Image (spheres, rainbow, N blue to C red):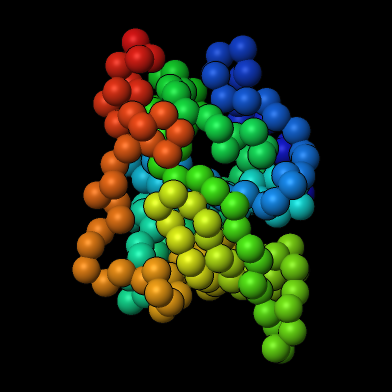
Amino acid sequence: MSLKEYKKKRKFSKTPEPKGKVKKSKKPIFVVQKHDASHLHYDFRLEISGVLKSWAVPKGPSMNPKDKRLAIETEDHPIDYANFEGIIPEGHYGAGTVMVWDKGTYENTTEKDDKKISAKKGYSYGHISFDLKGKKLKGGFSMNRFRENKWLLIKKDDKYADKRSNILNKKKSAKSGKTLKQIEKKGK
Ligand code: MN
């Protein structure tokens, strides 16, 4: 796990994103950032081995177990990135507005051959299961790799599953309570 690629892609004198370092939280965290870049998408990040493993989820997470959400793996991000909300300036990597859409801790529930294994091992096998304790996302989810950097993010059918309403209709930041537009305005 390394932040080499993360740092290579950014000029920290030009972007407000944190430089960060590899470190562990007391309890492993997750964050979902709504990112209004060239295409609006959601970035799902899960703490594994001192970094945030990261996936761009074009359609965003769903609480409906029938939805299989494509998640494209991107470079590892520093743990401090979970608090980043703001504007990446034009002409720079990921240019656009970033909102902390949801944030919390998670419990690893990954198993292989009926045995509990670490999220790190699960990641290497291409299968991770976890319980999210966020403000919006709650309960069991799984991620399965099906091709190189492509994974599927799927809600488990538990008491938090919701087949009726769209969780993405909750549009305010879990950090500041602001909408994307309000974050955008503040930056100007
Ligand atoms: Mn992004």
Side (left or right) of 188 relative to 154: left
Q: Residue at x 76, y 52 (%)?
A: 49
Residue 152 seen in the current view = no
Seen in the picture, residue 158 relative to 135 is either above or below; the reply is below
Q: Position of residue 35 (x, y in %)?
A: 40, 37
Question: Residue 22, located in which quarter of the rendered image?
Answer: top right
Q: Tell me how many marks there are.
A: 0
Q: Residue furthest left?
A: 164
Q: In the rendered view, does 150 fall on the left or right side of 183?
A: right
Q: As drawn, which residue projects farthest toward the bottom? A: 113
Residue 156 vs residue 185: left or right? right
Q: Name the residue located 60 percent from the left edge and 58 percent from the top edge.
A: 106
Does 22 appear above or below 16?
A: below
Image location (x, y in percent) of residue 5: 68, 38
Above or below: residue 131 compared with residue 7: below
Q: Residue at x 70, y 88 (%)?
A: 114
Quadrant into which the C terminus falls: top left
Q: What residue do we see at 41% from left, 47% from top?
A: 42
Residue 15 visible: yes
Residue 98 in the image, given as x and y percentages of width and height: 42, 32
- Compared across the picture, whether 132 is left or right of 165 comes to right
